[in-house]
Image (tube, rainbow, N blue to C red):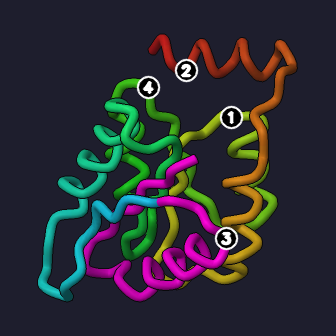
Amino acid sequence: MRIGIANDHHGIELKKEIIDYLEKNNIKYINYGCDEKNNVDYVDYAITLCNGINNKEVDLGILVCGTGIGMSIVANKMKNIIAAKVNSPGEAKLAREHNMANVMTLAEYTTNLNEILDNFINTTPSTEERHRRRVEKILNI
């Protein structure tokens, strides 16, 4: 498994924490994000990461901006992407399990980061027909 990470100027410190987690857990990653505090457009970084998923460079994506909302909006406009704005470990698990999210968006000041990452990366999407049916409807919009 390979994880893509992208951030705007707000998410630099949180991205460093995510990279530490991935390295400690021997998970490969690609950093598509900004590494300087200069004001940048989150839209560009979200598109780059989602293209990485669609080009099969990475399997899952994590996007970080000030609130996680802008990144989520952009990602959900991209083909084959189901992005979930996550605030808690439970939401991370359900985003993967029930919604089959392949992108998680986080706010700059996220708490319970390790547990959120564990749940998002290690949860297998459900095989239940009701969840698959709903996700297919989303992907066909």
Mark nearest the camera among 2 and 3 is 3
Distance, label 2 to label 3, CA atoms, is 32 Å
**Identity, as a three-letter code, of the amino acid under mark 1:** Asn
Mark nearest the camera among 4 and 2 is 4
Mark nearest the camera among 4 and 1 is 4
**Which residue is denoted by mark 3 in the rendering?**
25
Q: Determine which quarter of the picture holds residue 116.
A: bottom right
Mark nearest the camera among 3 and 1 is 3
**N-terminal-most mark, 2 or 3:** 3
**Height in image: 48 above or below 79?**
below
**Left or right placement of residue 39 versus residue 62 in this view:** left
Q: Secondary structure at mark 3?
A: loop
**N-terminal-most mark, 2 or 1:** 1
Q: Secondary structure at mark 2?
A: helix
**Left or right placement of residue 57 versus residue 81 in this view:** left
**Which residue is denoted by mark 4 in the rendering?**
80
Q: Position of residue 89 (x, y in %)?
A: 77, 65
Q: Which mark is residue 138?
A: 2
**Identity, as a three-letter code, of the amino acid under mark 3:** Asn
**Which residue is denoted by mark 1 in the rendering?**
99
Q: Position of residue 71 (x, y in %)?
A: 37, 56
